[in-house]
Structure formats: C-alpha cells, structure tokens
Image (cartoon, rainbow, N blue to C red):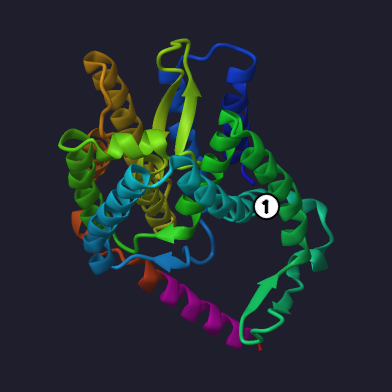
Amino acid sequence: MKKTERIANLALAGLTLAPLVVKVDPNVNVILTASITVFVGCYRSVKPTPPTETMSNEHAMRFPFVGSAMLLSLFLLFKFLSKDLVNTVLTAYFFVLGIVALSATLLPFIRRFLPKHWNEDVIVWRFPFFRSLEIEFTRSQIVAGIPGTFFCAWYASHKHWLANNILGLAFCIQGIEMLSLGSFKTGAILLVGLFVYDIFWVFFTPVMVSVAKSFDAPIKLLFPTSDSARPFSMLGLGDIVIPGIFVALALRYDVSRGKQPQYFKSAFLGYTFGLVLTIIVMNWFQAAQPALLYIVPSVIGFLAAHCIWNGDVKQLLEFDESKTANSSEESDAKSSKKVE
C-alpha cells in the first residue's frame, strides 16, 4: 500500500470516529468524508485486471428507470406496510450484505499478517441439499469475516449512527473498487441519466426524501449536528458511488497510459467542487438538494475541460477498459510462452 493511500485510510478512519470525541462541523464532515472515500475506492480499484462487473451502454440507459422503480416500490412499501416490519426485513438483508462488504474491505489489511497459503488456497463448500450450488473462499476471508460479523450484530441491535456510517463506507469503497463503467461514453450516459433521476425525485415528488427518512438501513451516511430539530445531516451512498466509479475510471485510464494521474486529479477535483456547491446551496435555501445536480456537471465538466485543453478528446472517448484488459492478458500469455 502506497504512503498516500495509507494516509487516506487513516484520515477516513479518524474522520469517521472524530464526532464521538469532538464537535465536527457536519458540512465539512460531509465534504471530507465523501471525498476521501472516493479517493480510497479509486486507488483500490487499480489492479492488474480491471473490476469484474462492467456496465454496458444499454445497462447505463436502463439504470435510472430501474432505480426509479425500486425507489417507488420502497415508497409504497413504507406507505402501506408497517415501517418496523419493512425495516426488520431490510436489516436482515443488510446484515448479510454488511458482513460481505466489511470482510472484503478489511481483507487487504488482514491478509498481510496471515500465512501465504491461507490467502491462496481456495476452499470449495457445497450446499447440503443443492450440490450444484457452491461457494469458494479462503481462510483469510473467513478471518476477515469474523470482525465483520460481530460488527454487523452490533449494528442490528443498536442501529448506532457510527455503525451505520462504517457499513455505508464499506459499501461505497467496495462499489467503487468492484464496479467498472468500461468506457467514458457509458459513464457519461449513466451520470446524465441519474442527473435527471435525482432532480425529478427530489424536486418534483416527496418520494426520495420520504424514503431516505423512513429507510433505517446503511444506504446513507449520517453526520451529527448540534441542531436538536435536525440531529443528522445525510448523504446518500449513491452520491458517492455513482460519481466515484467515473472518477475511478479516470484513474485507471491514466494508469493504462503509464502516466501520472492527471485526469484523475481533474475528475476528483470536480467531484469535490460539486460537493461543496451542494452544501452551499443546501444551506442557502435550507432545503434538501439532489447532490448529483451539482456533482455530475462538475465531474464531467472538469474532466472535459482538461481533456479538451490537452487535445486528448479522441483518445479518451475511444478508451475501452475491456479491450485494455484483453490486450494485457494476451501480452502476459505471450511472455509466459517465451519463458517456457
């Protein structure tokens, strides 16, 4: 792990725990926490092979409609069913999901202290009555899952805001690390679609705000305030993950060219600028704001301006991460044959 990444991880941990001991301005906390989370997730996504889950243009076009259907379904569930019942089911779901996300987030730190064969030897476990179903894991993953299980049990029993935030940060980091847009064209389609989605559901309907307040699960980060009427400021995980996977693509694009992270810096600066703008407008109007309204134009705008300035528009638009992965695999195969 590089020194910069190590510092970012420590800063994120310190910032998450800081409200327990000192008063932290929630506005500053939102900006710093979200920005550092994106930074950490982006650098974790840089691997010999790109993230396994890649989105196509068709998926990007459908995503806002699928998201709208899910959002409306949750709104109707909370409207016609007991809120406690819905949240109990969701808690059970996020209990399992949280163990997976936390163990995957902690794994790089834990595996350094374990024997090599614990990290490499794969164990295959088949379900008793469904032998075709199997799960593959290593001993190190089991070790990483132990603290995750105890932590998720604490979250389920107490629903403390700190537990909510740690699980939320794990989801964000894993989302940015594991998801790939494939190309900047796909990323632009997704961001523009969700830009419209966020504006519609926040400004034109009460659905988004109502679900966010009713949904007692780690789908948002909570930042303590000194206002008893509004004890927490909130930021949805989508406002971190969705722009984050676009910023991560910019970093991997820089890495694929063997250059310093120049476009990553402009995209990351755009994300931070969009967050700051969101906070300013929110405090000015004293009303909830769709963060993607400000983040999407900032991220795309900063990256586009930098790209046009350098004259790299064609190269950036033609970049396809899947083709890059295939070419690297072919070169590895050729080099291995030469060695033989």
Q: Main secondary structure of the magenta part?
A: helix
The answer to which quarter of the image holds residue 198 is: top left
Extent of the magenta region:
325-339
Q: For the residue labelled by badge 1, is the local secondary structure a helix, a strand or a loop? A: helix
On the question of residue 311 being in view, the answer is no
| Image x and y of residue 286, in percent | 26, 16
Q: Position of residue 310 (x, y in %)?
A: 23, 46
* Residue furthest right as drawn: 115
Residue at the (29%, 16%) spot, across then down: 283
- Residue 42 place in picture, x, y as percent: 47, 47
Membership of 289 in magenta stretch: no
- Disc 1 target residue: 108
- Residue 54 in sight from this viewpoint: yes
Q: Is residue 256 above or below residue 278?
A: below
In the image, 269 versus 31, the foreground residue is: 31
Q: Depth check: 328 or 76 in front?
A: 76
Report if residue 329 lies within the magenta region. Answer: yes
Seen at 39% across and 51% down, the residue is: 245
